Amino acid sequence: MVVAYKDRDAVGLTPVLAAALRRSLDAASAALSDAAPLVVAVPSTRSSRWRRGYDPVLRLAQAAGCRPARGVLVHVRGVRDSATLSAGERARNLAGALAVPSARAGQVRGRTIVLLDDVVTTGATLAEAARALRAAGATVSSAAVIAATRRRGPGADWSE
């Protein structure tokens, strides 16, 4: 469903996927001692936004009644499409690709963050987003996603 929504313009799936994202966000926020975490969506690349005409995670967040902080996490260099990359290649592809602009650092410093993304595949995107936010002084507590792909090979248990 997520692939159809993102890559085949199946925007009719928005209500179903937004509801799933809302449930995930509620669960990710429920255990936090911070009553008002800052919600930050993992940004799409500029080329993906241009190709689709929108940022799918932001669109779903808005449909779910969530207003993620805008502009606090940005791409600072190009990355390859990760669809055919291995877990290691994904991590290398994304290493250092995201940052918090200096003008926005005060918005995240000392704040508890809940990240938003659509799908966890290897965790590389969420790890890079968390790294960038932590470098700016934030505490990344959790992530809310719609789906996770089945991991294969060594270390395939998500609980490890």
Image: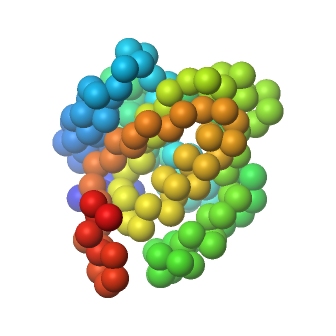
Q: Residue most toward the front? A: 160
103 or 106, nearer to the observer: 106
Image coloring type: rainbow
Q: Can you give x and y, in whole percent of width and height, for residue 99 in the image?
A: 70, 46
91 or 145, nearer to the observer: 91
Quadrant for the N terminus, please: bottom left
63 or 159, nearer to the observer: 159
Q: Residue most toward the bottom? A: 153
Q: Residue most toward the top? A: 35
Residue 45 placement, left or right of 4: right
Q: Quadrant of residue 100?
A: top right
Instruction: Identify the residue at horizontal 72%, vertical 29% (top origin).
Output: 105
Q: Can you give x and y, in whole percent of width and height, for residue 36 in the image?
A: 42, 16
Residue 33 placement, left or right of 93: left
Instruction: Identify the residue at horizontal 50%, vertical 27% (top origin).
Output: 112
Residue 43 placement, left or right of 58: right
Q: Can you give x and y, in whole percent of width and height, for residue 133 in the image?
A: 62, 40
Residue 115 placement, left or right of 77: left
Q: Quadrant of residue 134?
A: top right
Instruction: Identify the residue at horizontal 27%, vertical 60% (top origin).
Output: 159
Instruction: Identify the residue at horizontal 69%, vertical 42% (top origin).
Output: 135
Q: Quadrant of residue 81?
A: bottom right
Residue 63 higher or lower than 2, as above or below: above
Quadrant for the C terminus, please: bottom left
Evaluate whether residue 18 shows in this view: no
